[in-house]
Image (spheres, rainbow, N blue to C red):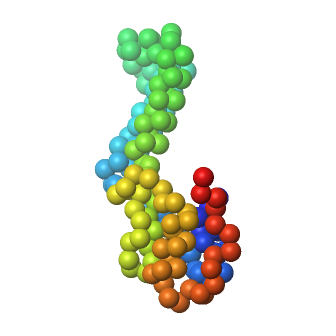
Amino acid sequence: MEYSQFCQRQYPGMKVTADIMQASNENRMIASFVGYAQAAGFAVAFFGPAIFGALSMPQPEWATYMQENKGLAIGGFFMGNIITGNLVQTGAFEIYLGPELLHSKIGTGVLPDVNWLVKELASRNPELPNLPPQVLLDQK
């Protein structure tokens, strides 16, 4: 269940906002380079003779190897997607109450327990209704 929906169901007056944490500029640049390398490798593997013929260049050995092993090129393409995804993923799930950080997935490595989150929000924010949360998730 999405945390924001659960919290808003418990405290209907609560305003929840979300933002995306961007990966570092270095990681985004490397991810772009990997994407360009993927496109170039794919083009050479499937259209190498036409490309090198249009450029009036002899076809290099590595290009011939890629054309003869198209499965390797396709595998490289999927591997590039995995690398790119890992480079741009931050893993961030940070919870703030105003300017105060309540929980950081980057710092702890885990998502917060939703029951803890609801209780923490209520204890730190006296403006929330004093009604007890309606339904907490089962603690098994």
Nearer to the camera, 108 or 21: 108
Residue 132 or 27: which is nearer the viewer?
A: 132
Q: Is residue 58 visible?
A: no
Q: Residue at x 35, y 48 (%)?
A: 27
Q: Position of residue 135 (x, y in %)?
A: 68, 69
Point out the residue furthest to the left here. Answer: 26
Left or right of residue 120, residue 14 in this image: right
Q: How many marks?
A: 0
Residue at image coords 64%, 66%:
136
Q: Quadrant of residue 55?
A: top left
| Above or below, comparing residue 32 to residue 124 in the picture | above
Give the residue at x 44% y 73%: 96
Q: Is 92 on the left or on the right of 46, as rendered?
A: left
Residue 46 quadrant: top right
The percent position of residue 82, horizontal first and vertical second, equals 47, 35
Note whether 128 is above or below 37 in the view shown: below
On screen, residue 111 versus residue 134, left or right, reads left
Question: Is residue 125 at all visible to an observer of this figure?
Answer: yes
Q: How far from the left and from the top, in percent, is residue 39?
A: 49, 33
In the picture, the quarter occupied by the N terminus is bottom right
What is the residue that sits farthest to the front in this orientation?
A: 140
Q: Residue at x 43, y 42 (%)?
A: 86
Instruction: Give x and y (percent) for residue 83.
Output: 43, 36
